[in-house]
Image: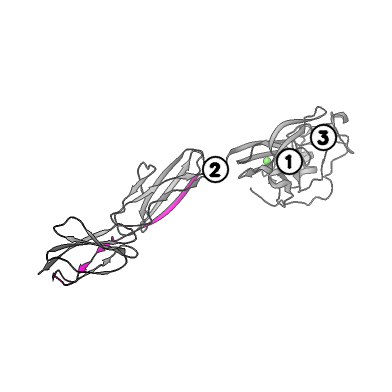
Amino acid sequence: MKKTRLLGLALAGVIAIPASIPAFAANSPLMYESSDINGLSIGIVGSFNNWGSSGEDDIPMNDNDNDGIYEGIIEIPSVTEDMISESITDNGTGEFVSRGFSGVQFKIRTNNSWSNNWGDYEPAYNRTYNSQTSCCVETKPGMSLTVKVWFDTTSVEDQSVQDEGDRFLPNDYDSFYVWPVRYEVIESKPVTKLTNTSTISSYAVPLGSSVMIYPSSDGTDKKVKYSIYYKKSSSSVWTAIKNPTYENKFYPKAITNYDIKVIAKDADGAVSKKDFSVKVYRPIENTSSLSKDTIKLGEKVKIRCSAKNGRGDYYYSVYCKKSSAKKWSKLIDFSPRTAALFTPASATKYDIRIYAYDDDRTPKSKTLTLTVTK
Ligand SMILES: [Ca+2]
């Protein structure tokens, strides 16, 4: 909500309204303005700022072109329950009538003062000037609202035709005036809380692996469209993923960092973006070896588990079998151990297979051959 402190005179007491005003001359309305409105600050107060009682200022109205018509804009980003009330207004036929309006109420006053016309009769529900009568903009919680308000000091209406039976409460005055207020709802739409909840499958991948991109969003019932872009972090040029679906494969082509951007846009035009960065690293390399390629029966061979590149800690699994056999025996089961001793039972050829793992958990295997002689 726009809030600007009102400038102008701090008005003490009652705005001077003459006890008797001559018949109003349509061609000289500014006479009234110059005597009562000029020099005053005019603002809008309402249920959206707790009628100013929570310390919020009125919304200022300005007449920058000096034509006697003041303008102000009420902007409410999100209408809440406590801004809503039922407008019960006197329609001027002698009794209070509920107009059935439920919404945000406001009225116009000068210099933050309630001093004028409090309780006085006003025939039109949409006319207000420091009076008890409010304008009502029909709305409901969860809407955003922009209302433009005009306060026309040149269109003064003589209400001396009303009498006490019509709740004409003239106080000390024989006649008085109200100033027409006109308002127009410039924009009223549901507050969208579109939230981009997209995810990716991994924030770090070895070169050769793909990253899945899953666009998703929350907070709106409207149809949401997604755009997905990626680029090398060092670049400023984005590439779009064409016709994204609910799962999109992205294959990084270089060992570097990539940026991924998912943009969600709903049918109301609300936009929510989400950025990811993906590190692409050199894939793990299995550098395991045997202490000897050939041993004599009865000797031991040392299996050295080692790896390089990849990401994170290394783990190994080691299997062996006679080359002529099909079934592998497990020597090490997914362990950070880097060495194992193997004593073959026969003088024959053996296959020794080492699986090296990093954080990616995709094993890189290496198969070595051991020859055992008599
Ligand atoms: Ca104006």
Q: Is residue 47 above or below residue 167?
A: below
Q: Secondary structure beneath disc 3?
A: loop
In the rendered structure, find residue 192 and report the number of the disc placed on it.
2
The image quadrant where one finds the C terminus is bottom left
In the rendered structure, find residue 121 and report the number of the disc placed on it.
3
- Can the viewer see residue 237? no
Residue 252 percent coordinates (x, y): 31, 53
- Precedes in sequence: disc 1 or disc 3: 1
In this view, which residue lies farthest toward the top?
Answer: 93
Front disc: 3 or 2 = 2
The three-letter code of the residue at mark 3 reads: Tyr
Marks 1 and 2, how far apart at CA: 28 Å
Q: Name the one closer to the observer, 255 or 145.
A: 255
Marks 1 and 3, how far apart at CA: 15 Å
Q: In this view, does 98 lie above or below 353?
A: above
What residue span does the magenta drawing correspond to?
Answer: 270-299
The three-letter code of the residue at mark 2 reads: Thr
Front disc: 1 or 2 = 2
The residue under label 1 is: 107
Q: How many labels does the image show?
A: 3
